[in-house]
Amino acid sequence: MQKYTILLITLLCATFVVAESTKVHISVIQKGSVDNYLAMMSNENYQVIATKNAVEDAMRATTVDIKENETLFFVESFSHMQPKLEGEVARLDNIIVVQLPIPPTGHSHYPEKPELYMKHIPMSENEGAVVLKNITRATGPNPGDLFHLSTHNVNIDRNFLKQKLEELSGAVPVTIGGSTFRIEERRSSTGRMRARAYLTREFQKIGFEVREHSYTQSWYQGTNLVAEKKGKNADKFLIISAHYDTVSTAGADDDGTGIIGILAIANALKDIPLDYTLRVVCFDQEEIGLVGSQAYARDLNSSGELNNMIGLIQLEMMGYDRDNDGGFHVIDCNENTSANLSDTVIKTVIASKVKLAMVPACTNRSDHASFWRYNKPAIVISQNFFGGDSNPCYHRGCDEVANIDYTYMQKITDSVAQTVRNIIASK
Ligand SMILES: [Zn+2]
């Protein structure tokens, strides 16, 4: 093993010219044994991203900002033999090094169809490389560890989750301002407006102050909904968030569970004195590219308010656990800024009676990622989407309340409520 590793490094080092240092935003995908390879292979000469997932997933989960003529590598790990990959430059046992050409713009997010960039480009001596430095990896419990949570002070009511999710996802009609309707989908402007009207009422009912954040972002216009309960130190705030739009579906799981989850947390904390402000944000237009959260982060940043944000916890799809193993994700992608936040969630879960198993994963495919751009702590919590137990109704017409596992949803919501309380309430 060791012998081959040295050969591999020699091969790569011999092939590349060192380029000028450049700022690189890196998310190391997954944890575990691949990290050892990463540590061995990372040096000043090139950028290496380790992943246990497919290269395609790693590309979606990674933001890179690199100059023209620079080279990016992915190290991919397989549990069993795979056919040769396009762009593969080396293979060592189950570790595969894949070279990815840089998108034509020279620096950007990789597009939705990464296979476009998977075509092999022969390496030449003139190819530069990217500097990889100062990656701090989060320390946390081992993947798959089982934790126990005691729900002493914050109680999330399963019936509350069920009733509210049925209303938000059109399973039952709601009556607001004298008119009765079903919120059948949350993509059209009518559907989203109805959802906002419903959520405004629900947050006002529990004493939260509600306002709309309307924005224009590139060619989109939309409205985020912000509900708040002030703490003793009113300026400093923790955000819990989810997206209320859907892809034309009822969106019970995606992301009705997240929205009702944050409503339930707000409800559970409504009578507890807070040291810091709890801000609940329902993002618009997540499904068309994190539009609402990008606009929100941008506006918080330009007003200076972002400096007062303690962190952001996004809830994204928490209603599906087919294999009943309690598997879920707490995702920080090893962002330096966000490790403490995910550790706090995990430590809270460790103290629990409810069985949840953390499955490591990394993604920038939800609203939390909009805040990484500003180096702010932000994490996303979800079902075991990347670990083989994702909802088969994801983005399909069958994403309805009939398929929701409320017991599982309650466990996660409860854990997050505890965490939020630990962070912003001393009593
Ligand atoms: Zn979603």
Image (cartoon, grey):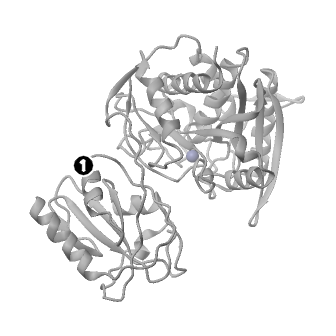
- For label 1, the SS is helix
Locate residue 306 relative to residue 415 in the image: left or right: right
Q: How dense is the environment of label 1, judged by Cα within 10 Å: few (below 14), some, or many (20 and up)?
A: few
172 or 85: nearer the viewer: 85
- Residue 201 shows in this picture: yes
Left-right relation of 138 to 290: left
Q: Total number of numbered labels?
A: 1
Query: Is residue 181 visible from the viewing direction of this image?
Result: no
Comparing 27 with 191, the one in front is 27
| Residue that extends furthest to the right in the rendered view of this protein | 178
Q: Nearer the viewer, residue 68 or 323?
A: 68
Residue 135 locus on image (x, y percent): 42, 55
Q: Position of residue 71 (x, y in %)?
A: 39, 76
Name the spot of residue 168 as percent of width and height, x first: 68, 33
Question: Quadrant of residue 329 in the image?
Answer: top left
Image-based side of 36 in relation to 25, left or right = left
Q: Measuring 51% from the left and 24% from the top, which residue is drawn there?
A: 415
Residue 121 position, x and y percent, is 33, 83
Q: Residue at x 48, y 41 (%)?
A: 339
Instruction: Identify the residue under disc 1.
Output: 33
As drawn, the residue found furthest toward the top would be 152
Going 18% across and 58% down the picture, which residue do you hit? 94
Q: Residue at x 37, y 38 (%)?
A: 359
- Quadrant into which the C terminus falls: top right
Is ligand 1 closer than 8 angstroms to the Cβ of mark 1? no
Residue 348 higher or lower than 102, as above or below:
above
Task: Check disc 1 and give the amino acid type.
Answer: Ser
